[in-house]
Amino acid sequence: MLLNKIKNVFHRKFLRTPGLEFLKKNISNTKKKENHINFWLNKASQNKNFKKFFYNLKRESISNINCRFKNNNYFLDNTMFKSLEQNGIVIIENALPYKEREKIINLFNELKNFSYSNLWDEPPVDKSDKSQGKALRNCGVIDIGNFEFLKKYSDQATKEVYGRIVKPSLEMHYLKLDQFEEETLSRGDTYLHSDRFLPNLKIFYTPFEITEYDAPFEYALRSHIIDKDYINCFIYGKNFDETDTETKCLINIKEKVIVKENTLYFAFTNGFHKRTAFTKKGAERFMLYLQYVKGFNKLHYLLQ
């Protein structure tokens, strides 16, 4: 346990994929931000898989491509990858078999009831922030090896996007809006925002239906494409979200992910996205996330 904590601290401090922290610390120094961004984006452009998904696309020439699909034998086919490449998101209904979905539901019930089995990597953490609309948030970390079909999807997607199989960090989040107050908007959550300026894949899974009232995910289609307009958002922006005037040219067509139960979606979250605000008092949201900033870190950019 102690060794894992030391490894996590070392990774966060020295190896974690560059995010927006440096840009925020140097918010008024345009030249410093530009040099930092160009250095890392040049490194990323040397990855031929990143070239395909992020660089070799012209935003204005892309035709409207469907981003919603039915499960294809628990496999991502070429049409799905084409949607991910051009739209920055692909959504798959009926994604997991019954047993795996039920296993995930049972773990979410543990988060909801604050009663935990020994499957968790460490005890889940209550991350509720009463200042942000009084939303309860309980989160847990678990190994991808516990989920056979999720792992298959992850392995296939990362090999295609990163050029190698990357092990994800898997987090499960249970949210519930306080029964007495509606949620207020917050940066980095309920405003359209970017997680980082470098290519970034994130996978989401919900075992339950998400309606208009359940804080659905929303994505600005094609905002993941790395071109001059995209780069200028990070050089000249202040908040790196929809409140910056520089982002207006990227946020045009939006996809609100209102879905049936047992839905999996893949999104490039260097593109602009958000969790929409809860609009129903007492609403709940169950979301599983796969992220890759630990598995594909600074060293992979520098040594490729």
Image (tube, rainbow, N blue to C red):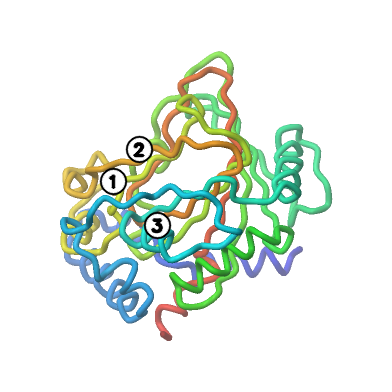
**Neighbour tally class for label 2: few under 14, some 14-19, many 20 plus, Cα within 10 Å:** many
Among the two numbered marks 2 and 3 on one chain, the one whose residue lies closer to the N terminus = 2
Which residue is denoted by mark 1 in the rendering? 239
Q: Is residue 296 left or right of residue 38?
A: right
Which residue is denoted by mark 3 in the rendering? 268
Q: Between residues 184 and 251, which one lies in front from this camera angle?
A: 251
Q: Give the amino acid type for the residue marked by disc 2 in the picture.
A: Tyr
Tag 1 and tag 3, C-beta contact below 8 Å: no
**Neighbour tally class for label 3: few under 14, some 14-19, many 20 plus, Cα within 10 Å:** many
Q: Quadrant of residue 269?
A: bottom left
Tell me if residue 54 comes above or below residue 120 in the rendering: below
Tell me if residue 186 comes above or below residue 116 in the rendering: above
Which residue is denoted by mark 2 in the rendering? 191
| Residue 289 visible in the picture | yes
Tag 2 and tag 1, C-beta contact below 8 Å: yes
Tag 2 and tag 3, C-beta contact below 8 Å: no
Image position, residue 123 (x, y; %): 75, 48
Among the two numbered marks 2 and 1 on one chain, the one whose residue lies closer to the N terminus = 2
Local secondary structure at mark 1: loop
Image position, residue 27 (x, y; %): 25, 54
